[in-house]
Amino acid sequence: MPCLRRSVRLAFTAALLWSFSLSGAYARKQDTGFLNRTVAVDGKVYRYVVYLPFEWSSGRRWPVILFLHGAGERGEDGMDETQIGLPMALRSHPERWPFVVVMPQLPYVHHHWTDPEMMAMAMAALRAEVREFHGDPQRVYLTGLSLGGYGVWEIAKEYPGRFAAIAPVCGGIFWSYEPSRWRDAELPEEYSRAIGRTPVWIFHGAEDRVVSTEEAQIMYSAIAKAGGDVRYWEYAGCQHNAWDKAYSDPQLPLWFLSHRLSDIPTAKPYAERRLIPLHPTPIRLDPSAYDALEGEYSDGGVVQITILRSGDRLLSKNRSGALAQLLPETPDRFFYPSGSSTRIIFERTSAGRVTGILYRDDRHEEFWSKTPLRDFH
C-alpha cells in the first residue's frame, strides 16, 4: 500500500507539472492584431496601438511601418487612429501587409505632427515596438495621411537615415498655420537635401481642396531635381481622400519591401510622375452584346443585382432599386463610372452562355448565379 500511495503521488505531481508547463506554453503565445500600448515621453504617458500580423513570430526580423493619422483622429484614447487609412487596409487585406505597424496618436492639446515633442513621441513609440517585436532596422518605413502627411515630410527631414522608404499621402511642407512658409523659396531644397536618396512615393488627389496639389508637385520636382528617388501618383477626380486609393493599392506594400536602408547610398536617381485616371477607358461594344447579360443574379435564392439593357447602355439595379450605368473594360468585365473599385465580371460556359456574375471589390469577391429574367421593364 505505501508503494501504491507513493506511485499515486508521483503520478499526481507529474500531471500537475505537465499542466503548469502547458498553461505556461499557452501564456507565452503572443497575441496578434491591434494591440494597445503606452509610451512615456518627458513624464507624459501617451496611448497608441501596434499591429502584429497573424503570422508574427519571434524567430525572425520583421519590417516595421510608422503610420501617422490625420486631424480627425486626434484624441487621448489611443484608438481613433486605427479607423482610416492604412489601418483599414490592414483589416481589408492583412495578407498584403506582413509588417509590424506602429500607430501613435496625436493628442487634442497638440495640433500638429510637426511639433518637435510630437515627433519625439512618435519616434519613441517606434523604437519601443522595434525592440519588442523584433523589428528589422534595415526595413523601417514611414507613411501618413493629411496632417500625418505633413508629419511624414517633417520626420523624414528631422530624422534622416532612419527610414528605408517614405510615402506621404495628401501632405506637404507648407503648413497652413504658418502661411509665411510659402514665401521661403529654399524650403523644398532643404527637405530634399535632408531626404537625399531615400525612396519617396507621393500620393495626392488632383481635386484636393484641403491640401493643395501644388504641395505634392513642388516636392516631387525638388526631389527629382536633386537626383533623388521619387514617384508621384496624382489621382484624377479625387479630392482630399487619396488615402483609400493609396493604401488599397497592392503595389505599395511590395514597394516598401523592395527597399532596405543599406540600399540608399548606392540608389540611382529615379523620377516617375503619373496621373491615375478615375476609371479605365471603356472599350467599344455592340449594344446587342448586352442582351445575353440581362437577368437577375442571386446568392442563396436572394436577388443581389439585376442587369438590364436600356438602348445602348447597360444598367445595374441593386436590391434597393437604385440604377447605375456599367461601362465595359473587357467584353465580360464592367466597372462603374463613379471611380469605384468594384468590378462586375460575367462568367460563361464554354458555349458562351452566361451563368453568373463574379462581384469583386477591393475587399472580397462573391459569385452570384443567373436566374430567369422576370419582367422588370
Image (tube, grey):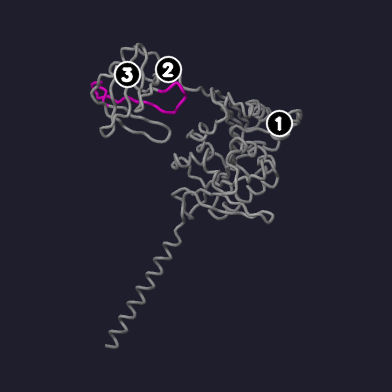
The disc at residue 282 is 2
Q: Secondary structure at mark 3?
A: strand
Type of amino acid under label 2: Pro
| Residue 226 or residue 318, whichever sits in front | 318
Q: First in sequence, mark 1 or 3: give its number.
A: 1
Spot occupied by residue 231 in the image (x, y as percentages of width and height)? 59, 30
Work out whether 120 lies above or below 351: below
Residue type highlighted by circle 3: Leu
Question: Which one is nearer the viewer's eye here, 338 or 217?
Answer: 338
Look at the image and tell me in which quarter the C terminus lies. top left
Q: Residue 81 lies in magenta, yes or no?
A: no
The mark tally for this picture is 3
Please provide percent x and percent y for residue 280: 45, 21
Image quadrant where residue 318 sits: top left
At label 1, the amino acid type is Pro
- The residue at which mark 3 appears reads as 308
Q: Which mark is residue 290?
A: none
Label 3 with label 2: CB-CB less than 8 Å: no
Tell me where the magenta segment starts and ends, as one range: 335-355
